[in-house]
Amino acid sequence: MIGTLAYWLAIAAGAGFAAFAGRARDVLVLGLSLILIAQWDLRAVAVVLALMGVVLAAAPRLGPDRPHNTLLTRGLVVFLVVTLVAFRQLLPLTGHAALLVAPLGLSYFAFKLIHVVVELSRGSFGPPQPLRFAQYLLLFPAFLAGPIERWDNFTAGRRERLTKDDVAFGLTRIAHGLIKKFCIAELLGTRLLALVSVDSIAHAEHVPPTWRLWGHIVGNLVYLYFDFSGYSDLALGGSALLGYRLQENFDRPFLATNITEWWRRWHISLLRWCMDYVYMPMLGLTRNPVLAGYCSMFVMGMWHNVSPAWAIWGLIHGTSLALYQRLQMRRRRLKIKPKPPAFAKRQVLRLVTVGAVIAPWAFTLTDKLGLYAGLRFFLGLFGVGIPA
């Protein structure tokens, strides 16, 4: 998407119009979004508009003082989740060429719609205005890879007219995104990925050396972070030039010294969504923070892909969070006052945190090769070899 001339012409046209007009810009930005996304995937536009119509039709009937509010909310959430799973997992099984790949941006706009339905039922805001709501779902710089913007944040971040600060912010973030995505990710990440072939883990008699496995998985981390955060920078910068300030999606995750802090810094919009709509409801229902954490990480895994490998990924990360929570609870019981770690200790904690985060990727990187390949990769990271 960002590699096309049409994308950058649309950014320039929207920014130029936003500098002189406020309300008319809404129509222009929505029109540009519809045209660009339809060129990439017409089905995505059709699905977004259809689901948007369902939510808008139900919106006046949602609210804490409305009859059948809980039943309607649950029905809509189940409908949106089933739609997401159907497009990603069930319809491709039909073998029809048009259904083999899910519509672009499906995971993002489905989670946005669930957010709107739940907050409407809570009375957090009233029914959205259709034109603005369509912009919220279809804003093209953020359509493919987020962030998972909140409706109230989206409306609050709208600028009537562009200012010099908006232009400077937008151009700076676009420059950062281009450097991250096309220089660092492509040049450094791909070199580290070349250290080992994932297929060799599944078929070779002996698992590659541990250092090669760690090099490959670190390469994936480098590539994913700079590619994904670079795209987020481009999304935030492009949206700012169109008159919208979106929420940050990354906050220097490599500075995290524990697993909990990492998830507060990595893919922030997804974490906040899971905290509000998975963790807190489960905590209120079960009074069990460990179970709520497991459920949150499981949903995060399934959001990426509904597969056993991503389920294991969620299980391992849920276990890491549970162990850290237990450690913190023990420290509080013993009345151990936390002290800022010394410089050397901070670096060790950061390395341990990164290792705990990326080790479960052994299963997701070999998702298509089967769980046994993932197990060989995971154990190989710790010097344990099992036969092919």
Image (tube, rainbow, N blue to C red):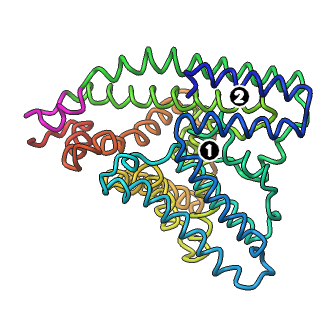
State whether residue 363 is above or below residue 307: above
Q: Amino acid at mark 2?
A: Gly
Check residue 238 in the rendering and tell me which mark sits there, or answer none.
2
List x then y, in percent, for residue 177: 61, 23
Which quarter of the rendered picture does the C terminus lie within?
top left
Query: Distance between the Cα atoms at labels 2 and 1?
Result: 19 Å
Q: Is residue 204 magenta?
A: yes
Measuring 63% from the left and 42% from the top, which residue is drawn there?
147
Measuring 71% from the left and 71% from the top, which residue is drawn there?
58
Query: Foreground: 382 or 46?
Result: 46
Measuring 51% from the left and 43% from the top, which residue is drawn there?
104
List x then y, in percent, for residue 28: 78, 35
Query: SS class of the residue under badge 2?
Result: helix
List x then y, in percent, for residue 242: 78, 31
Instruction: Please give the range of residues in magenta.
Output: 197-208
- Name which of mark 2 and mark 1 comes first in the sequence: 2
Measuring 69% from the left and 40% from the top, which residue is drawn there?
139
Q: Quadrant of residue 101?
A: top left
Query: Foreground: 228 or 340?
Result: 228
Q: Dot 2, how many residues are within 10 Å of its Cα: few (below 14), some (14-19), or many (20+)?
A: many
Query: SS class of the residue under badge 1?
Result: helix
The reply to whether the C-beta atoms of the residues labelled 2 and 1 are less than 8 Å apart is no
Residue labelled with disc 1: 268
List x then y, in percent, for residue 81: 51, 64
Depth check, mark 2 against mark 1: the one in front is 2
239 vs 273, left or right, is: right
361 vs 109, left or right, is: left
Query: Foreground: 30 or 169?
Result: 30
